Amino acid sequence: MAERAGRLPVKKTYKLYIGGAFPRSESGRTYEAEGQNVARASRKDVRDAVRAARAAQPKWAGMTAYNRGQVLYRVAEMLEARTGEFAELIGDEAEVHAAVDRFVWYAGWADKLAQVLGSANPVAGPYFNFTVPEPTGVVGVLVPEEPPLLGLVSRLAPVLVGGNGAVVVASESRPLAAIELAEVLATSDVPGGIANLLTGFRSELAPVLAAHMDVNALDVTGADGDVPELERLAADNVKRIVRGSADAQSPWEIAGFLELKTVWHPMGV
Amino acid sequence: MAELEQRGDRTPIPAAWEYASAPESREIVKLEERYGLFIGGEFVEPRSGEHYKTLDPSSEEPLAEIPQAGPEDVALAVGTARKAFSDGWSAASPAERAKYLFRIARILQERSREFAVLESLNGGKPIRESRDVDVPLAAAHFFYYAGWADKLEYAFPHRRQQPLGVAGQIIPWNFPLLMLAWKIAPALAAGNTVVLKPAETTPLSALLFCDVLRQAELPPGVVNIVTGDGATGAALVKSEVDKIAFTGSTEVGKAIQRELAGTGKKLTLELGGKAANIIFDDCALDQAVEGIVNGIYFNQGHVCCAGSRLLVQESIYEPLLEKLKRRLTTLRVGDPLDKNTDVGAINSRQQLDKIEELVAAGEEEGAEIYQPPCRLPEKGYWFAPTVFTNVAQSYRIAQEEIFGPVLSVLTFRTPDEAVEKANNTPYGLSAGVWTEKGSRILWMAQRLEAGVIWANTYNRFDPASPFGGYKESGFGREGGLHGLEPYLDFREDSADVIGG
Amino acid sequence: MAQAPALPTGFELPLEPRLPRIGSVDQVAVEARATDLSRRSIKREAKLFALDLAVRMMDLTTLEGADTPGKVAALASKAVRPDPSDASVPSVAAVCVYPNLVQTARERVAGSGVKVASVATAFPSGQSPIDLKVAEARRVVELGADEVDMVIDRGAFLAGRYAKVYDEIVQVKEAVAETHLKVILEVGELGTYDNVRRASLLAIAAGADFIKTSTGKLSSSATLPVTLVMLEAIRDVFEETGRRVGMKPAGGIRNAKQAVQTLVLVHETLGLDWLTPDLFRFGASSLLNDVLMQIRKEKTGRYQSPEYFTID
């Protein structure tokens, strides 16, 4: 933060983003990262975030795909508007542009997913049979350490566009972009609780998220040595495990957070 | 000829019309006394040196001796499959792969009677079902995926894809041949080779299938069959396969997921269920009754997607239950090979024990039991079709998968309540909805957390229709275009990764 | 049960969740159920039982413009003694002829127990004024018919004028009094199973002793699923009221196998009580000889030739 002559700047307190609000960690703990005191979330913060995501998710999934696409586009707009701020924070304007473009790209998928990933199935009988993708529910996301903004956006956008609620564990070493992004999300019509961003020690938070019985899927893209243990914990409620890449952009990245529902109905008079 | 009973001035009515027994002949099935493991295109003695007896569950009569494959046997099978994969199968022209699969489909059709009899003999299911459902669907599955083998680039356009390698597949005892087809057909279509482990109690149709492979002239080692119990399955999971596909209990599925944690191996799980079959008061009532019966008594209820929780709208409860109970009296329980049998034998002693234990728990918890009068054979494993009423959502019989011919009946008042109760389970495999109101069907279908929704029908299957669960019922789909995905490797797909 | 309150607009709500209700029928599911039941394997003594029953349930029918006393006399003789070479084969239930031939038929079946049925109410279309229909029905009874088969006015039914259909059945029932009344729905013109069920319940409510599928004048008639739908309507009425209504599939049942399949349907839907000519009939002309052939085949173990069975 550049200081201006003659005035002491007001510094931001970096907090968590849970249920659309910006609480401190219930534990009262912080840690220092990127020269700032950052909230160090606890297992209870994970619990609260999952609860918020679960509560908010049905409404998000129930919105029309068109509407959800517009909300995500709105995120891109708000992000674009704060390009300078983000560029200064992460030191890479190109990454900010890429992150904006990624949100725009995924926003456009909202109302196309069912057509690309679903199907009408020609069964051998007098039945109409179709398959549609649906959100898997609440997704735990361990985002990669780097790049701080694009890595986060690349993992979060596919989860959101699919209609899921997300509980994100931010980059431990570079968490500020996540909190800044939370401010973008908070001002861009994403319902509170749909995206929850936690900063803190990943080794502390990831196992809690992986073991949580009300989380449906776990994105381990940003996990490192602890993947086997996290996956073992995740098996307790048969979580879907997604191993993506920090920089992917594909509808199949969304597919990992979707369930497929097949409906049969007889055709008769 | 039945006796006639005189009633007043009416024409006499018969006292009974017993259908003469109509058993399908066992002659068509030629069993070996002892089988080997099918590895590299031939039957080999198990290195473990161990065998066990497989039974006819309707009589407890031993049918054959089956190898109990040990870790060494599994390793040999996997190695053989690996060699077959790299020696040509993965490079074989997709059109040739397709033709092998078409051949298999045709041979299954040609030998359908033989397979149907064997399936009923070893599994206890009525010949009516193995003849009309299991075997034709198994053939259809191979026919369907045969056509995909040389069209994969249209299944996943713009994605770089290749086969995974060796697929380890573990299947259950409820639909032995059909589950084999669900597993092997897409695996081969995608260019993989296979090591498949049939269920411990029902290995015979898989072993007969080896003869189909011989007739189809499938290259040796492309499909290998290792028999044995859970230990064999565990050895397969731990072996050098590239993928595990498992159908079975949620408990074992979780253990497999834990075992594979961190290995990066592809996994698909098709696990248990406790499906709600939801009956609205405006449904076509007699057809709904048939759907309920088909939902829970089909294959003795040994069906992961069985409609085991009946949710009835209270305003139709009484007449529906009367109709259901009446219908149960016409179910014919008995000899699986009799063409008139509707409900056959329970698959194993172990399964019968489990059913009996849960039914006892249901009675103890205060549910009211109904079973139609029926004579069960003295030998073999049998359980009468059962309905529990006065069931609370908290009872074990409403929560746990019984995997037997036991229906728990609960009631609801509004569509919201039906959805809430239906979803109130860790499982999410299937659900049924019965109403004549189209908009309500779609509303319900959207809200039910289940991979398969049958509206005004139940327990329908088709190779073109993706099947699989939400939540603890597993992940991945079998059937349809979506059923190919678990057998393809997209990891080197950089086309859609920007800067990757 | 209390009377349902009439709502201001004339709509009524049932007071109890009881049957029978009109409801609806799912085509795919009812056809699947009928197919399942048709696959029952009925062999040996069970089959012989069914074939014998089928003969006893048969309404041997001729309803042609070209019918003559000679033709009907021969038919009636056949009805009394279907297989002259096998005295154990029973007589059929009835002969069914046009009103002008009732007298001839009566003379031939006298003393045999075989009934004479005839048709009335502007058979087969039903498109005449009600007074003519009533007069015709009354006259058919006077001519000596034991049973009257009437048709419903499908035009009125399809136009949604159910009250007219209902009233006509009531009036015809009054006209024939104690004589057995079978009400033909002509299912081939009703278009849906929903309509078949609706018409079945309407006819039963109006006083039908039997409901019958068809006139035999259309190509689409007594299929297994349509029979099943009607049997289920009968069952609903029986279970709710205790009243036993008979069923007569007619038209399209040409061979013994179809007859046995139909009886399986009756057995598994309504039970043994309906396995009697009092409550179940087959309306057929060419079915009898095939049943006779099958009976002889079952008894001798040899496949038969039609040459050995009389055509009447």
Image: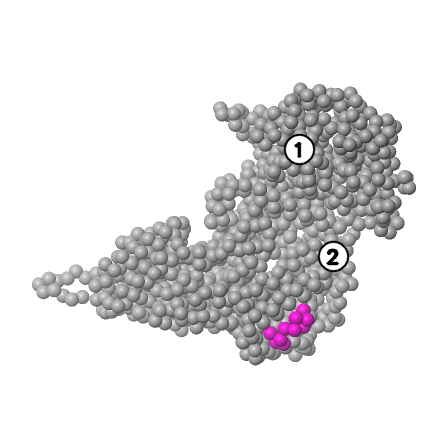
Residue C137: x and y in percent read: 72, 23
Whether tag 2 and tag 1 are in contact, CB under 8 A, the answer is no
**Residue A207 visible (yes or no):** no
A104 falls in the magenta region: no
Magenta residues, start to end: B212-222
What residue is shown at x 12% (from left), y 64% (from top)? A4
Residue nearer the viewer, C93 or C157? C157
**In the displayed image of the protein, which residue is found farthest to the left?**
A6
Q: Quadrant of the N terminus of chain B?
A: top right
Left or right side of B52 for A257: left
How would you rate the neighbour count of disc 2 (Cα within 10 Å): few for under 14, some for 14-19, many for 20 or more?
A: many
Q: CA distance from mark 2 to mark 1?
A: 41 Å
Q: Are marks 2 and 1 on the same chain?
A: no
What residue is shown at x 67% (from left), y 76% (from top)? B42
- The chain letter for the residue carrying disc 1 is C
The amino acid on which the numbered mark 1 sits, given as a three-letter code, is Leu
B215 falls in the magenta region: yes
